[in-house]
Amino acid sequence: MTAHVHIEQVEASDLDDRRIRALAGLLSVASSERLDGDPPISPAQLALDERIAPPWLRHTHALAWDETGTLLASAFLELEDRADNRHLAWFEVFASPGARRRGHGSVVLATLLPVALDDGRTVAMGGAREGGPGSAFAAAIGLEVGQLEHSNRARTADMPRDVLRSWVAEASTAAPGYSLLSVDGPFPDDLLEPYSRLALVMNDAPRDDLQMEDFDYSADQLRSLQLAAEQRGTKRWTVIARHDPTGELVGLTELHIKQHDRWLAHQGDTGVVAAHRGHGLGRWLKATNALRLLDEHPEVETVQTWNASTNPHMLAINHEMGFRAAWVQELVQSPIEPLVERLLTRP
């Protein structure tokens, strides 16, 4: 690493406007490398995302600056204070093109990982675009690929309205005895507990070789997550499938539209309880939200979602909706203690 580089560790809630602007610039470069043509990341949106979080979610950054005040590299650490997956620490590393292969990425990551060790975490997990500079960095520091994940995108102008309408129409015959419940924003109190149980359906999603346990959001954690999204000005649309004879909640889908960077909507979790699959509920759920998006938010140009490469059913639904692979993400992992040793001894 070159001389006159200053490394600082900053809690996300303490990032001031100068640091936010510099970080947004660095992340925008990484975003444009990943997919040419994406607009720059809005500092206003980044500030909201970093400064407002539920109390059980802790974000810390390590930033490498040169003597002119230019941000060379950053690392991000996320620790989730939940009952499950207490061994995990999530991270990301970014370096500006001119600062790569000079040790800055290793130093900022090595700065943060002791925070995870002190908190009792044993496994670090992150993501890197397959074939990109992050993938090369991950391989160089001994991270192993645990899963390949497709980032799929659909241009709203290309989404097939007729197909989506047909899915909704077909539900009347293919899914008798089921109905949909739509909720905008935070849930009412009586829905929190049953939805937190329904959300466990996402544990059925493939994890391949990831060193990850089933997760279990409590109703209180779900409430705080939704309230944080509301405080950030994020629109959160949830559509839930209900089995009317029993009143059981059996399917879900979520869509998120951020306050800024409104050209891009985010398709969140979609899942159907195993005993209720085969009725087209997943298509019905996703089509309902997608048609609403097309009708109410013409400013949204693109919808993005993520799917494991080993989840062919959901990939097929997304393909029919107009989603196409944008890039492939490697989810990489390593035990933390030997990773720190490797980072500190890199030439």
Image (cartoon, rainbow, N blue to C red):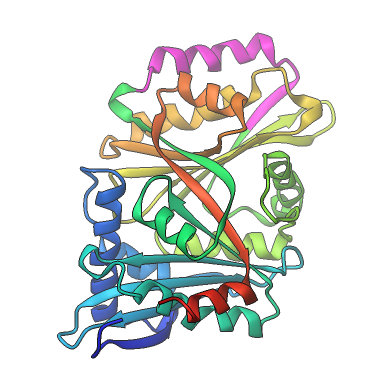
Residue 212 appears at what percent x and percent y? 70, 56
The vertical placement of 205 against 85, above or below, is above
Position in image of residue 333 (x %, y %) = 59, 59
Residue 233 picture location, percent across and down? 39, 59
The residue drawn where x is 19% and y is 78% is 70
What is the span of residues highlighted in magenta in the rendered image? Answer: 159-180
Q: Is residue 240 left or right of residue 307?
A: right
| In-image side of 333 versus 63 (left or right) | right
Q: Is residue 213 left or right of residue 231?
A: right
Q: Quadrant of residue 311?
A: top right
User: Which residue ends up furthest to the left in the rendered image?
Assistant: 68
Instruction: Relative to 141, say whether 175 is above or below.
Output: above
Q: Nearer the viewer, residue 316 or 189?
A: 316
Q: Is residue 162 left or right of residue 228?
A: left
Q: Is residue 56 visible?
A: no
Q: Residue at x 65, y 24 (%)?
A: 281
Q: Residue at x 74, y 61 (%)?
A: 218
Q: Is residue 45 magenta?
A: no
Q: At which x and y percent is residue 192?
A: 70, 54
